[in-house]
Image (cartoon, grey):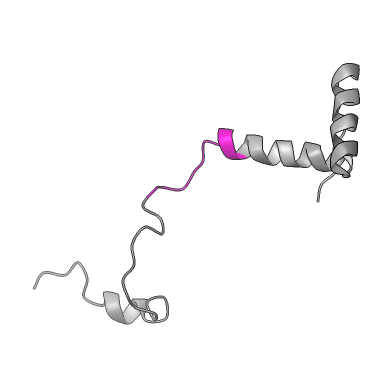
Amino acid sequence: MEKTTLYLDGNDYRRLKRVASRKRVAPAQLVREAVAEYVVRHDTTRLARSVGAFCSGRTDLSERAEDLLSGFGKAQ
């Protein structure tokens, strides 16, 4: 975990502390959760939708990749 300093408006900080108190967590925990949600919504480097979308039915694909691809791309 990395440490950072954050400056908040006084009113926002008081409200954050009130919510944290109700949830019985530290205000820092709420800030970490909020940042994690924000990053998920706004990060532009997402995986393609096709990643993980297909199933070959094989359980040994990564172990046998070289064997299975031998000759791939060569004229027959």
| Horizontal relation, residue 3 to residue 36: left or right | right
Identify the residue at the far front of this view. 22
* Residue 15 visible: yes
In the image, taking residue 49 as reference, residue 29 lies left or right, namely right
In this orientation, does residue 9 appear? no
Give the position of the C terminus as an image quadrant: bottom left
Task: Pinpoint residue 52: horizontal percent, then vertical percent.
Answer: 41, 59
Q: Nearer the viewer, residue 75 or 37?
A: 37
Q: Front-most of 62 and 28?
A: 28
Name which quarter of the figure residue 67 lies in.
bottom left
Would residue 46 be found to the left or right of residue 60 on screen?
Answer: right
> In the image, what residue occupies the spot 34% across and 67% down?
55
Vertical placement of 76 versus 51: above or below? below
Q: Residue at x 59, y 40 (%)?
A: 40
The residue stretch that appears in magenta: 40-49
Question: Where residue 3 sits: x, y (%)?
Answer: 85, 43
Residue at image x 39%, y 80%?
59
> Is 34 a magenta residue?
no
Specify the quadrant of the image occupied by residue 10.
Answer: top right
Check the image and report above or below for 25 versus 18: below
Residue at 46%, 48% in the rendered image = 47
Q: Quadrant of residue 54?
A: bottom left
Q: Work out whether residue 26 or residue 38 is closer to the camera in this orientation and state it.
A: 26
Residue 6 image point, x, y percent: 85, 29
